[in-house]
Amino acid sequence: MRRQDIRNIAIIAHVDHGKTTLVDALLRQSGQFRESQLQGDCILDSNDLERERGITILAKNIAVHYKGVKVNIIDTPGHSDFGGEVERVLRMADGALILVDAFEGPKPQTRFVLTKALEVGLKPIIVVNKIDRIDCRPEDVVLETVHLIEELGHADSLDVPYIFASGRAGYASHDPLARSGTILPLLDMVLEHIPGPVANVEEPFQMMVTSLTWSDYVGRIVVGRINNGRVKPGMKVAILKKGGVQVTSTIEKVELFDKLGKVEAEVAEAGDIVALTGLGDSEIGDTITDTAAPIALPRTEVDEPTLSMV
Ligand code: GDP
């Protein structure tokens, strides 16, 4: 069964192609800045656009709500140095926005992460960005990106949906000559073309630790997408580590990503991307499961432990 109330998408771009600016436009236009909801160091002032912009850069996972659907947008590290991490992060998503500068076209980082995204089976949407640039060549860039997808062995590359955008001016359109509008057609495309997550809610709980973060108050925070089942605060779980080692632990807090921050939840279920506390022994690549069904998920090849921000 697939959930219809959620979409998990990765955003892929070469540096400077406008990822941060585009995500900011999505947040701002989907009305997420009206309340100051951010946990942590910064309180958002809805009039302070400069500050809003700066903050997105710090948030690895954000969520916007659109037409009754929660869209989790997962930032992906763009460098090959991150090896296994890219793959793990991409595995949280079902689709990917391939953001490409309308003048520059696809670049090495686009290629690197796109290769991984197609390998893990994500549905791509091409977003040709910065179409406000006078020197832009949006239609050529669509073709170049389609060809790249084709070259990477994606048979149905001609069916890949695409859209034109100016993240900076805050619009997206099917018309490469558009010069105004809203960014929201991009979210319509996500709802239409990216499937909701496969979610076996009635199975025993199972998720992989995709990233870790840290807070002075609660210690280690484990982030991942729930593969199966449900998780609640107070639940006893097994942490399945390398070499068949298993430890038992108790979940303290369950949080869901919301806008730029996180909110506590009484329950989270398959398909959700969660942040869990109370699992001090867990590392990236471990599987967290129901104690009654300790079945590990396959590890990605490179399992370097990294502490990253969420
Ligand atoms: P990131 O590295 O992919 O996160 O890129 P940023 O969002 O930080 O943008 C990189 C640069 O491109 C900045 O100077 C932005 O102002 C500029 N930029 C971003 N979006 C657009 C756009 O839609 N049009 C134009 N002309 N410039 C943009």
Image (cartoon, rainbow, N blue to C red):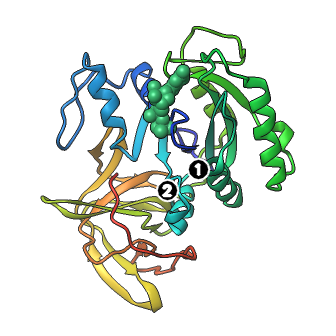
Tell me: 308 left or right of 23.
left
Q: Residue at x 48, y 76 (%)?
A: 303
Label 2 Cα neighbours within 10 Å, binned few <14 / some 14-19 / many ≥20: many
What amino acid is at disc 2? Ala
Q: Where is 126 relative to 256, above or below?
A: above
Q: Residue at x 35, y 59 (%)?
A: 308
Q: Residue at x 62, y 44 (%)?
A: 96
Residue 202: where, in percent of width, then height?
51, 61
Q: Where is 5 relative to 92, above or below?
A: above
* Label 1 CB sits under 8 Å from any ligand 1 atom: no
* Label 2 CB sits under 8 Å from any ligand 1 atom: no
Tell me: 165 left or right of 20.
right
Let me know if residue 69 appears in the view: no
Q: Are marks 2 and 1 in contact (CB under 8 Å)?
A: yes
Badge 1 is on which residue? 197
Residue 196: where, in percent of width, then height?
60, 44
Q: CA distance from mark 2 to mark 1?
A: 8 Å
- Does label 2 or label 1 sit earlier along the sequence? 1
Badge 2 is on which residue? 270
Q: In the displayed image of the protein, which residue is found farthest to the front?
A: 135
Q: Nearer the viewer, residue 15 or 181?
A: 15
